[in-house]
Image (cartoon, coloured by chain):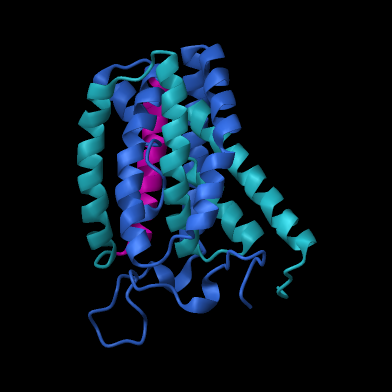
Amino acid sequence: MSPDSTAGASSARSLKLIVIGTVAGLFSGLFGVGGGSVIVPLLVLWLAYGEREATATSLAAIVFIAGFAAAVQGLYGNVDVGYAALIGVPAIAGVLVGTWLQQRLHTRSIALLFAALLVASAVELVLR
Amino acid sequence: MAGLLGVGGGVLFVPGLVIFLGLGQHQAEATSLLAIVPVALVGTYRQDRYGHVERHDALMLGLLSLAGAAGGVALANVLSGSVLRDAFAALMVLIAAQLVYRTLSAGDDAAPAPKRPSTLPASDDPAPAPKRSSSGGRDALD
């Protein structure tokens, strides 16, 4: 991709960010997820990010996105702070352990197992 | 686990809250969002130390998400719990498919950091410079 610092390229880039941000916000607000599944592929596809930078930048954006969405959900009275702490604290531990594990395990197998877990959970969720 | 795979939290939080703690779909989603904030913060801090975070873009994405996030929450609260739950289950399957696709097309990046002699970089090393996007109006360095 040839470098181009004209105003046209800048506004094209800004437009892409606006679209990604808005769609990610929509996903996050509608589904209660971070929005990374939207942000990462689009950063890679539209803004030529590397996978690692896309994931890291997405995580940073998610802090804001999930925060906004949580605040709006709070206005609806849907947020349970106690349960959030109950799942959040072990999840933080999981992030720290996970990063350590990533260097030592076959990420591919874990990822596939995780995908299987997602499908199993989806089935269980619908059967409730 | 979210850190292990780069999948945002929430995709397991929500069903966990519904299945194991008996929350309604709306409450589970809302509570999940709150829990995601500190988790993403910790993950971000780690990644930032390696220099992987494009701070300007991240900030822009966050600020630009406000309208979408408000709209998404409003929409969620208009839908019934069972419709939302079914939609969420469908999303989980899509994310699983996306994950499988990314994993199977990832090649050697998925191998563990070698303790064996090898020229492969450890997976947590800062990414090589050519892969970084710049923040100055260009999409890529090369």
Q: Position of residue B6 (x, y in %)?
A: 40, 53
User: Is A116 contained in the magenta span?
Assistant: yes
Who's the residue at 23% across and 79% down the image? B115
Left or right of B84, for residue A88 = left
Q: Position of residue B101 (x, y in %)?
A: 52, 55
Q: Position of residue B87 (x, y in %)?
A: 53, 25
Q: Is residue A71 above or below residue B22?
A: below
Who's the residue at 48% across and 46% down the image? A36
Q: Is residue B30 above or below residue B59?
A: above
Say which of A38 and B69 sits in front: B69
Left or right of B87, for residue A107 = left
Name the dominant secondary structure of the magenta segment. helix
The hue used for chain B is blue
Span highlighted in magenta in the image: A106-128
Q: Position of residue B55 (x, y in %)?
A: 47, 57
Work out which residue is located at the far right of the displayed protein and give it.
A8
Quadrant of the rendered image containing residue B33:
top left
User: Is B89 contained in the magenta span?
Assistant: no
Left or right of A87, for residue A119 = right
Say which of B139 and A39 sits in front: B139
Q: Is residue A70 above or below residue B98?
A: above
Left or right of A122, for residue A104 = left
Q: Quadrant of the C terminus of chain B?
A: bottom right
The hue used for chain A is cyan
Who's the residue at 51% across and 43% down the image? B62
Who's the residue at 30% across and 40% down the image? B38
